[in-house]
Amino acid sequence: MANPIDWHARARELRIDGRCVIDGERRAAQNGETFACLSPIDGRSLGEVARGREADVDAAVRAARAAFDDGRWADKAPAQRKRILQKFAEKILAAKEELALLETLDMGKPIRDSLAVDVPSASRCIQWYAEAVDKVYDEIAPTPKSGLALITREPMGVIGAIVPWNYPMLMASWKLGPALAAGNSVVLKPSEKSPLTALRLAELAVEAGLPPGVFNVVPGYGHEAGEALALHMQVDAIGFTGSTRTGRRMLDYAGRSNLKRVYNELGGKSAFVVFDDFADVARAARTVAGSMFYNQGESCNAPSRVFVHERIADQFVATVAAEAPKYQPGDPLDAATAMGALVDDTQLKTVMGYIDAGQSEGARIAAGGKRVRTESGGYFVEPTVFDGVANTMKIAREEIFGPVMSVIRFKDEAEGVAMANDSSYGLQASVWSDNINRAHRVARRLRAGTVHVNQYDEDDITVPFGGYKQSGNGRDKSLHAFDKYTELKTTWIRID
């Protein structure tokens, strides 16, 4: 058996390059500015990262536009783009340990998850879209014999991608896969809280044969680099994943610039509805604990609103409370750790503020509720379960983005569905019932982009991801993602 990896030793040896990747090469910010990249694990400095601003974004967009206009990527045959993207996916897998370490150090998730989930899933996403691109056909409309109408998909041009810090590599791949496969050029702005894997991905793409200028990365702050990208007149579309608050700004930026397409994947407050006719209450409780506390609760689809029929609620809460200690935060560089650190001090204060709000509004803590591992210098919060929550409380209305679950009791199906839908969000939901009629009936009534039945964590690149209401518009993943990064053109031909 191979010796386990000493991740702490690898971390000590790590030397990062925080410069932008523009036109296929590393570049410092034009004004020379940088910002410190700090690890949430223990507060250590990982190095300095370029603080991209408007001038750097402009350079990246110009490189992307030149690459698109001269056809070095867009004009390649789909089979050629496929081969290069497949090689890119292979290089991601080959650099699995390096990328996983960067991801864990940068945003605090357990190394076992970075290795087993984030890196392989990012590689599979790129590979899947590579495979798809020469299997997506155009159309011929049913016209009279006097004409021929072709309906074709064309790449949009320059895509601005702005991604969050909770799944830095995976969220980037969800934009990059379809955008690049369709023939676009991309400028990616990663979160300033987690820029490292994005920069490395751009290097790997160039090594795989992606032409210079096709994939550029400009790290920096949202109000500087992100705003400049969203306002740029040469950017044709923005693919944004992040908060609803910032998503509103993206729409404003589009209106203030060139009316670029904006595709927002925003927040969530997902409902997990358990009926008393579901026999295995313990399995439902174990599932929601595993899903809620995964990635420290820093997931937009986290099932943070748990609606349980009042007849089984006591049993359910007891089981969830017993599960919570299994996710006690530990050292993210320890392969046995199940839950890691919150991304930074700001997020820690936000989460602890919500825990205080839940208590002050009268909810009862059934498990957790405290900051832990303070001696590490990192940002760790216990998995927390609230019972006795009303659907009107702050912890039930607002996205917390931390390991905090609210259990809300309901009397009957109508009340459970009404409360589940009583949210400004509609990203995901789950219904648990052994009655097939109820399962289908409730799944149809829940206003969410994905509804899970008797499970929560099953997922794949082949299905669309996105939400109703203020959870966003458009869909990531699946063939439907091509809709975000292509234009439809109709070409009429007269036949005499």
Image (spheres, helix red, strand yellow):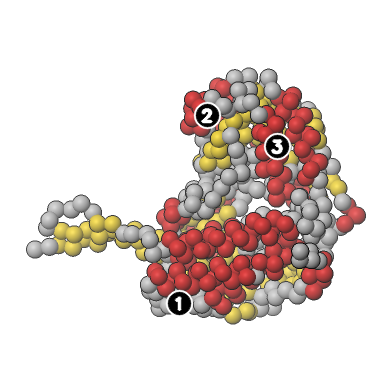
Residue on which the image places disc 1: 66
**Spatial CA span between label 2 and label 1:** 52 Å
Badge 2 marks a residue whose secondary structure is: helix
Q: Quadrant of residue 414?
A: top right
Q: Give the class, few, some or many, for how many residues have Cα within 10 Å of label 2's Cα (few <14, many ≥20).
A: some
Residue on which the image places disc 2: 439
Residue type at mark 1 is: Ala
Compare residues 254 and 314 and report the one nearer the observer: 314
The answer to whether 182 appears left or right of 41 in the picture is left
Residue type at mark 3 is: Arg
- Tell me residue 22's x, y (percent): 57, 76
Badge 1 marks a residue whose secondary structure is: helix
Rendered residue at 74%/55% (across/down)? 110
The answer to whether 119 appears left or right of 315 in the picture is left
First in sequence: mark 1 vs mark 3: 1
Residue on which the image places disc 3: 286
Rendered residue at 70%/69% (across/down)? 98
Label 2 or label 1, whichever lies nearer to me, is: 2
First in sequence: mark 3 vs mark 2: 3
Label 1 or label 3, whichever lies nearer to me, is: 3
Rendered residue at 12%/58% (across/down)? 146
First in sequence: mark 2 vs mark 1: 1
Compare residues 406 and 224 and report the one nearer the observer: 406
Q: How many marks?
A: 3
The answer to whether 23 appears left or right of 406 in the picture is left
- Tell me residue 338's x, y (percent): 76, 50
Quadrant of the image containing the C terminus: bottom left
**Spatial CA span between label 3 and label 2:** 20 Å
The residue furthest front is 1
